[in-house]
Image: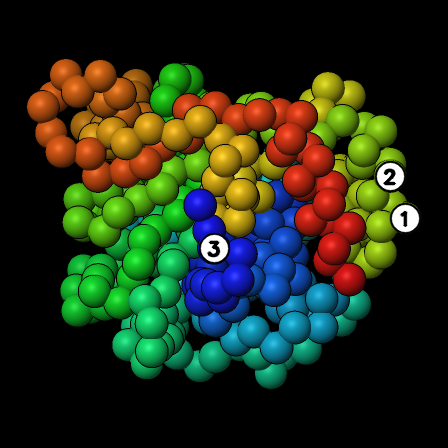
Amino acid sequence: MKQTDTVTPIIIDTDPGIDDAVAIAIALYDPTLDVKLISTVAGNVGLDATTLNAEKLMTYFDKNVPIARGAAEPLIRQFEDASDIHGKTGMEGFDFPEPRKDLLLKENSVDAMRHVLMSSDKPITLVTIGPLTNVALLLKTYPEVKSHISEIVMMGGSVTRGNKGVMAEFNIYVDPEAAKIVLKSGIHVTMATLDAGMGTAIPPEETARMDDMGKVGHMAHDLFQRYRKRSFGTGLKMYDPCAIACILQPDLFTMQDAFVDVETAGELTAGCTVIDLKGYLHKEPNATVTTGVDSQRFCEWFMKAIERCD
Ligand code: RIB
Ligand code: CA
């Protein structure tokens, strides 16, 4: 459980992305989180678009957080995006102001993350809400950063079924080899899984209320009109905000320590997270996995968090 009086330094690695946009807003406006860097990766849409979206968000939120461009494609596999869900730009539905261009660092996100981690006076939480390509490259290129990372909190993986193919969650599916490297790194991972995310539906009447909740609520309201059209009526799942909630309000979730690995060889199952809840593999747990969420309390937490973003 996070101590509310302490400020936690974090780096967010992201592929904005509509649910990324609200997750980033909640993190930026929470007084107990100190966002040191936004690192962008290809995922929901290509790297140019996710990086431009990060600039749009920092400009709209009026936050001076540096941005660094990361990987434009997975370590090995062919890049596949989710523009069918987030739209061609990755944040269809809201008319953002012209983005400022002075936040984008010259160095790539691997070097930028290393610099932030090595110059911090306390360990930093790495929050990943997109594919794990950048983090895998960071850990392989600069293993010395590991002792400067307190934990990795990721939206990724699923205990049961997937949302990209039968068994894979999108962030893992895009770059399973990167996910395997991160899970084998020895750094503790808190996994906000799809299974918990499925219980975070924000119903249409709550989305309607957001429109009058200040500039972040208005942005979310407009983006949500476009996002995952088919599930608007039954409620939009807040996958990436779950990662932030795991830091700010972990008691919303049921969690369990488990050994987790990633299937990379399977023809039909590549990207599947094998989460050994019963210890069949007799391996030490490397992750704390969300297995469920209190849906009502999450919705209340989420709406209060959006309301506070002002
Ligand atoms: O599976 C959900 C994840 O994939 C979220 O991070 C969403 O933004 C997409 O990247
Ligand atoms: Ca994302």
* Among the two numbered marks 3 and 1 on one chain, the one whose residue lies closer to the N terminus: 3
* Among the two numbered marks 2 and 3 on one chain, the one whose residue lies closer to the N terminus: 3
Vertical comparison of 120 with 248: above or below: below
Q: CA distance from mark 3 to mark 1?
A: 31 Å
Disc 2 designates what residue? 209
Residue 291 is left or right of residue 267, and the answer is right
Disc 3 designates what residue? 3
Vertical comparison of 160 with 310: above or below: above
Quadrant for the C terminus in the image: bottom right
Estimate how packed mark 1 is, as few (under 14), some (14 to 19) or many (20 or more) residues with alpha carbons within 10 Å: few
Quadrant for residue 272, please give it.
top left
Q: Secondary structure at mark 3?
A: loop
- Residue 137: image x %, image y %? 26, 59
Q: Is residue 93 visible?
A: no
| Farthest left residue in view | 282
**Point 76% across, 71% down: residue:** 98
Residue type, numbered disc 2: Arg
**Point 41% across, 17% down: residue:** 161
For the rendered model, the colour scheme is rainbow
Front of the two marks 3 and 1: 3
Quadrant for residue 51, please give it.
bottom right
* Callouts 1 and 2 close, C-beta under 8 Å: yes
Q: Which mark is residue 212?
A: 1
Residue 93 is left or right of residue 120, and the answer is right
Residue type, numbered disc 3: Gln
Quadrant for the N terminus in the image: top left
Q: Is residue 102 visible?
A: yes
**Point 81% across, 33% down: residue:** 206
Estimate how packed mark 3 is, as few (under 14), some (14 to 19) or many (20 or more) residues with alpha carbons within 10 Å: few
